[in-house]
Amino acid sequence: MKALFVHPGPLLYTNVFLRLEPLGLELVAQAARRARHQVRLIDLQVESHADYHRMIAEWQPDFIAFSCNYLANVPEIVDLAKATRLALPRSFVCVGGHSASFTGPAILEHGEGAIDCVLKGEGEPGIVKLLEAVAGDRSAVAKVPGALTADGEGPRPAFVHDLNELRPARDLVRHRRKYFIGILDPCASIEFSRGCPWDCSFCSAWTFYGRSYRAISPERVVEDLASIREPGVFIVDDVAFIQEKHGFAIGEAIARKGMRKNFYLETRGDVLLRNKEVFQFWKKLGVTYIFLGIEAIDEEGLRKFRKRIPLGRNFEALEFVRSLGIEAAINIIADPDWDEERFRVVRDWCMDVPEVVNISINTPYPGTETWLTEQRRLQTRDYRLFDIQHAVLPTKLPLEKFYRELLHTQRVLYSKHMNWRTTPQLLGLLARNLARGQANFLRGIVKYNKVFSLDTMLGDHARPVHYELPLPPRPQADAPAAKKASQLYIHAPRGRAGRTIDDAAERFVEATRMGASG
Ligand code: B12
Ligand code: SF4
């Protein structure tokens, strides 16, 4: 069959700071290719809807699969599916990915018959079975693990049998030089592990993967890295180097091959402090940026987000990153109940630290515990606003004032990095990128004021809403935490056996998490 894989368009962030290759979709496309289907991929972050329509008109795929990791992309995907149904009435349309897995019934309903199936969970095993059913016995579609159709739901999605057997179909992406993160331009993505053993209440990474954690072998990582031509590499793991020896094994394999890249990774402060040597080693291998989800600058805030890392440890982790000479980027979650004073305190704190600070807005997502327990009513259910840059919960300040404060804070932080001290260095880096024909980040800087403006933000709230996220279920105050969590899982938890970490790391995770689930 001819199968087309589609990544939806950019979100707010993607227009300025970063745009990354659709690694998950490449893996799913490769699984289909291995099953001998003809496969193409289009990434609407870097191509237009007109390109998409041209491609389906010319190539006439039998099967079209959209990747829906981000909730904010749901309306775009539903509209594209409807247009596709009109253009190619006989082709099969499916939607998969992180957010689709948590909102399957609503996506089918919005599609009004244009979406044949939502395929939940990791896509690699499911897509092969789904394509087989679509090509042969269509009545078998509803029995495919992870499939949700108007006729019913298949069994729970299956895990990939062995992550080491997979390779992303990097060759299918047509504009590789368009992917970047800040000055890492161009930048590819790579996976060293999948899943997360922690269970933070605002996050759905762990509920998707059933709190499992699987490591990819150093041999497979090196082989994949060898296929990457870009100098920058984004490590997509939720928490990098949870298991020190895995980090060393990969690093040593890379060093033996003499490979040199500039890496970007994300991790937790307590992991950094526990596994200092591995981060020291990776500094030598080229880690340029470490992103730390500090989330809050006071103990109360941290408790709220259920990250059981004492504040002092987070600051110690920051000190450690600085001591390595690696750039740290920090994320802080702004709560909609922040007032002017709270914003001022945060601004002052951020100005005192040398790091790049990013501020996102506390947003309850389907698939998270906060989604089930958040007592505040949503002030909007417009999918497009669920991008952690818009306030979807009622703000204590009037919305306009809240955005004014937020934008002011973001601008202060942004200009901190564009000041007279950093500008010469930044200009040098931009010039070097330009000389190599890479202007993605420069374009982002130019667009900053247009993207992050009060009028744009308020205008986003005023747009007509065609598709609304269904309301979260009523919170059940008496339901035990474990029961609440178990309702959320996409992949069935396999308990301790599902986590390829040693007992010491498992004990460390237990001591630093707060959940009651397996
Ligand atoms: C790396 C990452 C990023 C990277 C790049 C992501 C990218 N290129 O798309 C960056 C830093 C840019 C990023 C940014 C954001 N992210 Co992000 N990100 C992740 C992270 C940690 C890993 C994603 C990843 O690459 N995984 C590895 C690949 C192999 O897996 P995958 O893409 O999920 O694909 C698999 C399945 O989803 C599925 N699948 C995917 N597509 C399809 C399609 C079909 C047809 C099928 C059948 C299956 C399928 O199969 C794939 C293979 O198994 C996830 C958390 C997580 N563990 O999933 C959060 C996550 C996806 N991000 C999240 C969010 C909120 C964001 C931001 C909005 C804000 C932020 N956190 O910074 C921005 C917006 C990004 C944008 N597009 O503008 C949320 C999503 C919440 C939601 N429900 O919308 C997540 C779940 C994290 C969380 N805290 O809960 N992100
Ligand atoms: S540590 Fe917490 S926030 Fe980070 S990926 Fe794991 S569960 Fe999500």
Image (cartoon, helix red, strand yellow):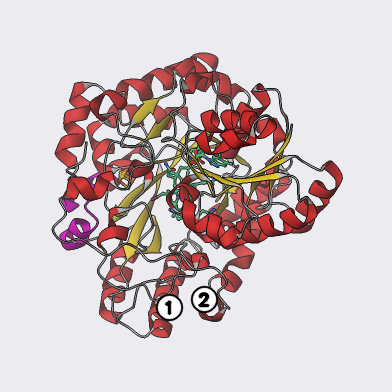
Q: Is residue 261 left or right of residue 248?
A: right
Position above or below: 2 against 379: above
Residue 124 visible in the snapshot: yes
Q: Is mark 1 within 8 Å of ligand 1?
A: no
> Ligand 1 within 8 A of label 2's CB?
no
State left or right for residue 27 relative to residue 402. right
In-front residue for pair 453/109: 109
Reading the image, the residue beneath label 1 is: 403
166 w.r.t. 174: above or below: above
State the residue at coordinates (21%, 52%). Answer: 306
Residue corresponding to mark 2: 457
Taking the image as drawn, is residue 308 in sight? no
Answer whether labels 1 and 2 touch (C-beta < 8 Å).
Answer: yes
Q: Which residues are magenta?
A: 298-317
Is residue 349 within the magenta segment? no
Q: Residues within 10 Å of mark 2 (few under 14, many from 20)?
A: many
**For the C terminus, which image quadrant?**
top left
Residue 241: percent from the left, percent from the top? 35, 31
Circle 1 — which element? Answer: helix
- Kind of residue indicated by mark 2: Met
**Quarter location, residue 30:** top right
Amino acid found under the numbered disc labelled 1: Tyr
Instruction: Give the distance between the C-alpha atoms of the residues marked 1 and 2, in whole angstroms.
Output: 8 Å
Q: Is residue 72 left or right of residue 482?
A: right
